[in-house]
Image (spheres, rainbow, N blue to C red):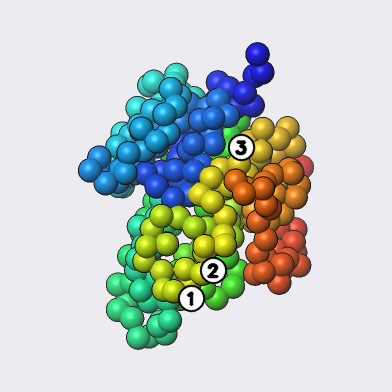
Amino acid sequence: MTTKPLSGQVALVTGASRGIGKGIAVQLGEAGATVYVTGRPPAKQEGISQSLNLPTLEQTAQEITKREVRKLFERIAKEQNGRLDILVNNAYSAVTTVTNGANAKFYEEDPAVFDAVNNVGLTNHYICSVYAARLMVPRKKGFIVTLTSEGGIAPLFGVAYCVGKSACNRMAADMAHDLIDSNICSVSLCPGAVKTELIMKVATDTMRNRFQAGETIEFSGKCVVALAADPKLMDKTGHILNTTDLAKEYDLFDEDGTQPHSEIITKYHDYLQSTNEVRAPKKE
């Protein structure tokens, strides 16, 4: 019997009721991890429990909020004897907001858009990372993945969106400095265009054409599994990683047999390499 690469590990994926988070949860579960998920209330979960069909899945059926984060991590600590190996910060609540304002100048939008875009997609990532690190540091082991996007390195979907994604990259890198001595890896992961259920529903025709040719929701999950199983994972701590490069490095293929390719990643490849070199911590 073949041992699954993440057998015995415990993971939490936020925002996993659909889209990229759901795909990551599926891949982690298939790799043998016990997976906790957060998401929309049960009526909006779109059948995640049934569609995952994984005995390793533990469902936390709630929209995670500041007040609920502590209780969620207390639950994981109690049920898993203080163990959490992987945190995937993926929760995001502003897809409709950013697509509706994709062509607007920042000064044409209500200033409240900034909080609408970044409260869940940035602030919540920070809070979850704090509680995850408190479980990981005593064990001297862990992996924190913060989902970002091409908007973190190039103009995309407006200023509020790009600032938030840039901040995700910086947060992951700076957390890596605090965590390196505890053997905990922190990275940001940048997929290319992903044909999620929601983006295909709300996107404009032009935008939909681009995303239709994009990655499936599970490809980022394949990347997370490959990283988590890599014995040299700590070499990547603090880095902005992308699915285009990871596909080549780990020989990963999407459901249609292709490897993702991003024109933005190709254009900014030198920038990413130099940024990773400057920001990533070096263990003394």
Mark 3: few/some/many CA within 10 Å (<14, 14-19, 20+) = many
Q: Are marks 3 and 1 in contact (CB under 8 Å)?
A: no
The x and y percentages for residue 86 are 53, 35
Kindly report which numbered mark, 2 or 3, lies closer to the viewer in this rendering: 2
Residue 268 shown left or right of residue 58 in the figure: right
Q: Is residue 280 visible?
A: no
Q: For this rendering, which residue is in front, 116 or 100?
A: 100
The x and y percentages for residue 96 are 35, 66
- Disc 3 is placed on an element classified as helix
| Residue bearing mark 1 | 206
**Screen quadrant of the N terminus:** top right
Residue type, numbered disc 1: Thr
- Disc 1 is placed on an element classified as helix
* Residue drawn where x is 51% and y is 49% of the image: 217
Which mark sits nearer the N-terminus, 2 or 3?
2
Image label count: 3
The x and y percentages for residue 106 are 40, 82
Q: Is residue 4 above or below residue 280?
A: above
User: Residues under labels 2 and 3: Cα distance?
Assistant: 26 Å
Which mark sits nearer the N-terminus, 3 or 1?
1
Q: For this rendering, which residue is in front, 193 or 107?
A: 193
Q: Are marks 1 and 2 in contact (CB under 8 Å)?
A: yes
* Residue drawn where x is 62% and y is 23% of the image: 4
Query: Among all residues in the image, which is located at the extreme front?
Result: 256
